[in-house]
Amino acid sequence: MARLNVQTLAQLPDSVKKPAYDLKTTGCGIVHIGPGAFHRAHQAVYTDLAMAHGGDWRIQAVSMRSRDLQEKLTEQDNLYALAVLDHQPYTQIVGALKNVFVLATDRAAIMEALGIANTHIITLTITEKGYCLNNQGELDTSHPDIRHDLEFVQEPVSAIGLLVAALSQRKKEAHCKLTIISCDNLSDNGTKLGAAVKAFASLLDANLADWIEQNICFPNTMVDSITPATDSELIERTEAELGVHDAWPIQREAFSQWVIEDKFSGPRPAWEKVGVTFTDDVHVFEKAKLRILNGTHSTLAYIGSLCGLDTVYAAINEPALEQFIRRLLTKEILPTIDAGDKLDVSAYADEIIQRYHNPHIRHMLAQIAWDGSQKLPFRILNTIRDRLTAKGAILHLCAPVAAWILFIAQRQQSGEKLTDPNAEKLLALAAEHQHNVTDFADAILNLQEVFAELSDNRQFRDTVHAQLATLKKLDKSNPADCLGAL
Ligand code: CS2
């Protein structure tokens, strides 16, 4: 079967949306670091639509490690299909990616892309762990990648090291007007990224750190669209629809939101014409999304997995689990978000639960369960901190923490892979305490890099232990009793 590419684009069915700008003549303006599924379903799509309004904004993508995308997309002129799976499904071909580079082999091309004056924006989706931050949200200078990059500044392996190498080059060539946009689920993502980049730069050259401070904006953002990983079903479905083969299509729900702090050093695509919101204060949107969506997502992932369920759809359709999620939201999460008149948080939470009920989306709980040690601090622990300060209850919020602990213990026992940058340490603790889950929980709660000062909080520890005792009684064939008691 023919491959999706510039030649076969013209023969695709009319029902498939195509790029509304000239792929041959439109130049590049953005470098994106970490072109995973989320980037390709979200920022790349907004940029694709914005180019219909003009501008040279195609994206040069930099993959920090994986070669897969480059191998697959090169053969199809970097075009790919986005399947929007909802009540009114549709497929769209995205042409925003111009190149895909791989750090280990395309260093020179990447430095050129990052350095040229035409690059006005760098975006990042490198996941929480990619920022190399410590438990205070600051650059972790003891992180092996950061230590490596401080020594070998010309050969960075971390995104922070790469950005600083690029900024140093731009400073020499006096190419400023660059905005760097974090698109990951971290609270105050832009502020944290900016601080990490400046901290790294200041360890090399104080003038460079000053120059960055004066010339480069790091807006905060909130990004949202549920994007399950590509599976063989999607590849087959896309092929049947297009009549040509796409080796790596992407799927997502229809809902998509991008809120960006209106703080740019230079020009940007006409994103405001295609649904992106620019605002002076992203904080409330970011906080609401992280705590309500990502917080309940991780809760569903760990508790749902313990119940033997496999997708968000299956988990939210377990009535006792939906009821627990609703209690968690109303009693403990929503009271921590003071949105004033910017957002009706309870309507927002309802809408998110409706999105989980989308029958067309098969979002694996195992995918969301990845990297718990990196995600829980932003999704659940900060909410717990606010509740403790306000002297509010934290019972429900401690359930996902306890479920995460049991989830690790189960992975250790079953031998199934645990995906987490701290997996080795977590599994070693699970093995050491395999006969006593209470001791294992204590060992996990002692991890300062995850819990910081919460490790020493008696109320927090006791409540996690109480929820652990309840969850230990969970019976997969009748989860309602246990879930009702959480
Ligand atoms: C999910 C998110 O994988 C996860 O951890 O919670 O990727 C979530 O689907 C997105 O943030 C939705 O915008």
Image (cartoon, helix red, strand yellow):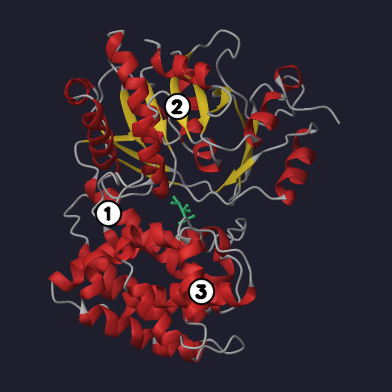
Q: Please name the residue that numbered disc 2 is placed on.
A: 155
Q: Earlier in the sequence, mark 3 or mark 2?
A: 2
Q: Please name the residue that numbered disc 3 is placed on.
A: 407
* Residue projecting furthest to the left: 390
Q: Earlier in the sequence, mark 1 or mark 3?
A: 1
Q: Is residue 27 above or below residue 463?
A: above
Q: Are marks 3 and 2 in contact (CB under 8 Å)?
A: no
**Residue 22 position in % (x across, y down):** 58, 12
Q: Is label 2 in a helix, a strand or a loop?
A: loop
Q: Is residue 46 above or below residue 57?
A: below
**Residue 266 position in % (x across, y down):** 28, 17
Q: Please name the residue that numbered disc 1 is placed on.
A: 287
Q: Is residue 166 above or below residue 42?
A: above
Quarter in which the N terminus is drawn: top right
Quick one: 20 or 328, which is closer to the camera? 328
Confirm if mark 2 falls within 8 A of ligand 1.
no
Name the quadrant containing residue 374: bottom left
Q: Are marks 2 and 1 in contact (CB under 8 Å)?
A: no
Question: Which residue is at a point 50% across and 11% down the rendered structure image?
Answer: 27
Dot 2 amino acid type:
Glu
